[in-house]
Amino acid sequence: MNSDNIKYPFHLTTHPFQGFWDLKYERNTRIDLTISFFILLSLMVTNVLSNQYAGFIVNIYNPEEMNSLMEIVYVLIPVLFWCTANWSLTTLMDGEGKFVEIFIATCFALVPLVMINFPWIWLSNFISMQEAMFYYLSQSFAVIWFFFLIFVGNMTVHQYTPSKTVGTIVLTIIAMGFIAFLCLLFFSLIQQIIAFFSVIYQEIVFRY
């Protein structure tokens, strides 16, 4: 992997229309998939470190009670739900994007969340209460930038119009909620089945 491939995510964040177009039609999918996993891993690490080591003025979590595994899940699950829901819907709505292209575009859109939030892990330990507004302002800017990149990426990958892209994003969010509901229902059912067989096992053991 050469330096151009490493620099490309930063190029895409500042030139999203050209960047996502090249991502779909010009670049090597295998290399971009590797970069995507690295970006996703970087966001997981940033999320864990931010909740663990951010300054006490802006950190709403108790570091002693934080579960690092859950912080990773809070990043991984929404990305997987988004990609699955988006692919499922756009397949029915004449979208041109494959699942791997949706995943790559989504991960590349995460770059501002890493690029802006990671330095604040260190900087937040040296700011006062009055300066905390800059921390929240930069986080808000990162989120807005991320949503803009998601919009452009979704529009380019599927070759949609802006209005259809907005509609697709709204439907994707609704579908994500439906998928989450089905997953919770499934795990609840599994838990009840395990509890049922556990009770039967205990009854057999105690009787014999």
Image (cartoon, rainbow, N blue to C red):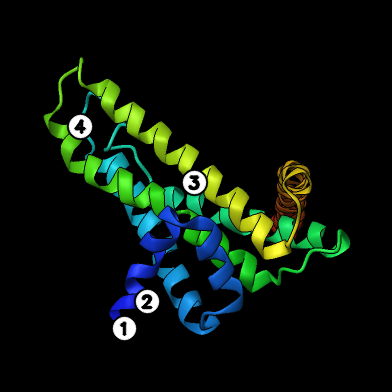
In the figure, 78 relative to 156: above or below? above
Q: Which residue is mark 2?
A: 5
Q: Which residue is mark 4?
A: 55
- Please state the horizontal and vertical placement of residue 59, each as a whole percent of the image: 29, 30
Q: CA distance from mark 1 to mark 4?
A: 36 Å
Residue at the spot 71% in from the left edge and 43% down from the top edge: 173
Quarter of the picture holding the N terminus: bottom left
**Residue reaching furthest left?**
126
Which label was assigned to residue 2?
Answer: 1
Residue 51 showing in the rendered view = yes
| Disc with the residue nearer the chain's start (3 vs 2) | 2
Q: Nearer the viewer, residue 184 or 167?
A: 167
Residue kind at label 2, given as amino acid type: Asn
Query: Which element type, helix, strand or loop, lies under badge 1?
Result: loop
Mark 2 closeness class: few <14, some 14–19, many ≥20 residues within 10 Å:
some
To which quarter of the image does residue 138 belong? top left
Q: CA distance from mark 3 to mark 1?
A: 25 Å
| Disc with the residue nearer the chain's start (1 vs 4) | 1
Asked whether the residues under the numbered discs 1 and 2 touch, taking CB atoms below 8 Å apart as contact, a structural biologist would say yes
- Please state the horizontal and vertical placement of residue 98, each as a whole percent of the image: 71, 72
In the figure, 90 relative to 96: above or below? above
- Please state the horizontal and vertical placement of residue 24, each as a whole percent of the image: 60, 73
Residue kind at label 3, given as amino acid type: Phe
| Disc with the residue nearer the chain's start (4 vs 3) | 4
Q: CA distance from mark 1 to mark 2?
A: 6 Å
Residue kind at label 4, given as amino acid type: Gly
Q: Which residue is mark 3?
A: 146
Mark 4 closeness class: few <14, some 14–19, many ≥20 residues within 10 Å:
many
Q: Nearer the viewer, residue 70 or 137?
A: 137
Q: CA distance from mark 2 to mark 4?
A: 34 Å
